[in-house]
Amino acid sequence: MSLEIKEVVTDSDMKNFVLFPYKLYRGNKFWIPPMISDEIASLKPGKNPAFEYCKAKFWIALQNNQVVGRIGAIINSKYNEKVQEKFGRFTRIEFIDNETVVKKLLDTAENWIAQQGMQKIHGPLGFSNLDHQGILIEGFEHLPSIASEYHFPYYQKHIENCGYEKEIDWLEFRLTIKDIPEKALRLNEIIKERYKLKVIHFTKNSEMIAYGEKVFQLINRSFNDIFGMVELSPKMRDFYIQKYLKVLNPKFVKIVENLEGQILGFIIGMPSLSEAFQKARGRLFPLGWWYILRALKKNTVADLLLTGVDPNYQKQGIPAVLITELQKVLLEHGIQYVETTAMVETNQKAIQTWKNYEHIQHKRKRCFIKFL
């Protein structure tokens, strides 16, 4: 039978869209299944406040009544206003190793984006920088963090064959955690005293959530120049607070304040949930919650999810303080390795930080672009 591209309209369509990767990557030991309920919520206007300034459509590819691919398209008006260009995004693309399937999926997204008056398409990108972004092009033999992506090696070839070129890459690193040198500990104390810095430690999620709004306000300030970044609205901040902060181990979150109580920087780590998510298979029940809870309490790998420093205070040693304070916790919990989340390749200041550690740069993701 011929290939059919079907717009996601019904709940059944949405279920097929979200569940397709579970079929595609079945048996793959490196793919991390996301939580199904979170994925569905992120694609619904009534659940995701990004729809206040984003248009989006989603499609599945059917062959012999079987899903063989999927794609979404997003127009983020806030991003286009910021860069003063007419961009559309393709998102959440997945497909079997078939040139016709990927071409029809991309053609569908491109046509809809062009009909909205856009001149370029790039992706994969999500609704925000905290959403899915990038195609994995290096590091297929490494387990990603739950905040990263995994794809088959054939993706890059098929996307490039459809006329797409590189726009930008993200890099990921694996750090080996060792004892903190006495010199670094002394320097940490000197910086805190010199600039009158206070490190906030947490033992309960409720304590941490109370800082959530201030943290996301700092994200808006410190990430403003990062590729693809759009300021998160109050509703978007609350959306991510509810989504992420409730599942973090509060001991792995550190905040630095000045004497006036102004947040100058934060670092968010977490014991790796990658293997736990694989066992959970996208569901908290019946046993997913138990796998996650066990991983949060006992692990040898941690994920470094997010770090931010106020642009006006980046030369005061705050990143060094944050990393040292987190490293103390990592060592206390028996963490031997840290997986960083993706860093834009042009963010050399942040990338240089990892040269102080035994590390490997083991993954690379790519955002592609095409003129319509």
Image (tube, rainbow, N blue to C red):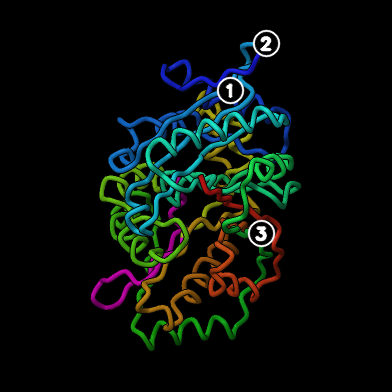
Magenta span contains residue 261: yes
Residue identifier under label 1: 61
Q: Is residue 13 above or below residue 352?
A: above
Whole-angstrom CA distance, mark 1 to mark 3, is: 39 Å
Number of residues whose C-alpha sits closer than 10 Å to that of mark 3, classed few (under 14), some (14–19) or many (20 or more): many
- Residue linked to disc 3: 337
- Residue 354 image point, x, y percent: 62, 71
| Region in magenta | 247-267
Residue drawn at the location 33% of the way across and 32% of the way down:
47
Q: Residue at x 58, y 50 (%)?
A: 368
Query: From what the image shows, is residue 302 above or below residue 56?
Result: below
Query: At label 1, which amino acid type do we have?
Result: Ala
Label disc, if present, on residue 87 of the rendered structure? none
Pick the quarter of the image with the N terminus.
top right
Q: Quadrant of residue 316?
A: bottom left
Q: Residues within 10 Å of mark 2 (few under 14, many from 20)?
A: few
Q: State which tag comes first along the sequence, 2 or 1.
A: 2
Please say whether residue 119 is one of the residues in the magenta stretch.
no
- Residue type for callout 2: Met
